[in-house]
Amino acid sequence: MATIEISCVEVWREISNYLEDEISPEMRERMGAHFKTCAHCSAVLDGTRNVVGLVGDGKLYQTPEGFNKRLYKKIQKLP
Amino acid sequence: MTQPGLRVSEAELIRSVCAGEREAFYELVRPYERMIYATAISVVKSPDDAEEVAQEAVLKAFSNLSGFRAESKFSTWIVQITYNEARMKLRKARRHLYESLDGQQECVDGDYWPRDFADWRPIPSELLEEDDVRQAVENAINSLSPMFREVLTLRDMQNLTIKETSTVLGISEAAVKTRLHRARLLLRDSLAPGIDGCWSKAQPYRKVRSW
């Protein structure tokens, strides 16, 4: 059976759920077919996946130098 | 075996602290230092304020540790305390402004249309070791409005589940998903041009956008 086509707007709406794997198998298939032929939506998917990976990489918002020492001192001073 | 082992040792540390061993508290908190700091900065934005909030949150966690119930994870519990402390600090500092913001329903209804469709040139995570790239990504996150920044920090940076994120923020899981979706697309758009259009040192200057 042919996959029912899906519009770009519908794809954008579900990009996040697609990355979280929180969509039905049928929707995943429709989106997968769309990405194969739509360079714009593929660019949106690639970029979104990339930024989610960067945010979760563990390198952002490092504690400033001396943070742990200052925190440790505060704990030491607790009554 | 590793995971249950870790949980036991955390539970043991908590028992030790409750029995009066202060050193154990520092051991307990140490793995979460960055998580606490990042949560604080996602709300208050300034590094100095974030450190102050982080310290206050840790001290509060110490005072309330005997009330900690193992139904939630320790990490989620301390993130919750940090988030509440940060919100309180923001309210004190910007009382009039923040109250008006609180009452305002920021619109997340309707579709978000991406602004940039040029082929995406991946930003490799190794580049985050370079100060200017890391700063650019942090600036892009900082420029999101608080409702998007907070949800992105908790879910995508701290790896809390949708449910845990909804508990910490006091919003529905559906709202978490909607905000997260918008936050990710906004962040993608703001990072699309890269730094001077070029993310990789290995490549000569090449515009990401074709115009």
Image (cartoon, rainbow, N blue to C red):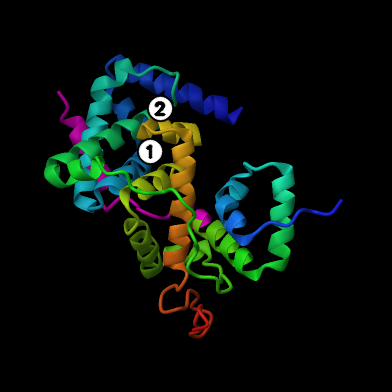
Q: Quickly name the residue at label 2.
A: B74
- Distance, label 2 to label 1, CA atoms, is 10 Å
Chain identity of mark 2: B
> Which segment is the magenta one?
A52-79
At label 1, the amino acid type is: Tyr
Q: Tell me where residue A38 sits by quadrant.
A: bottom right
| Disc 1 residue crowd, few under 14, some 14–19, many 20+, Cα 10 Å | some
Secondary structure at badge 2 equals: helix
Label 2 vs 1, first from the N-terminus? 1
* Depth order, front residue of B146/B37: B146
Q: Position of residue B176 (x, y in %)?
A: 45, 40
Asked if the magenta segment contains residue B151, the reply would be no
Element assignment for label 1: helix
Tell me the residue that label 1 is attached to. B32
Q: In the rendered view, would you say A60 is above or below B72? A: below
Q: Position of residue B193 (x, y in %)?
A: 45, 73
Quarter of the image where one finds residue B172: top left
| Three-letter code, disc 2 | Phe
Q: Are marks 2 and 1 in contact (CB under 8 Å)?
A: yes
Q: Could you tell me which residue is drawn at 40 percent across and 46 percent down?
A: B153
Q: Give above or below for B96 relative to B56.
A: below
* Residue at position x 28%, y 27% in the image: B61
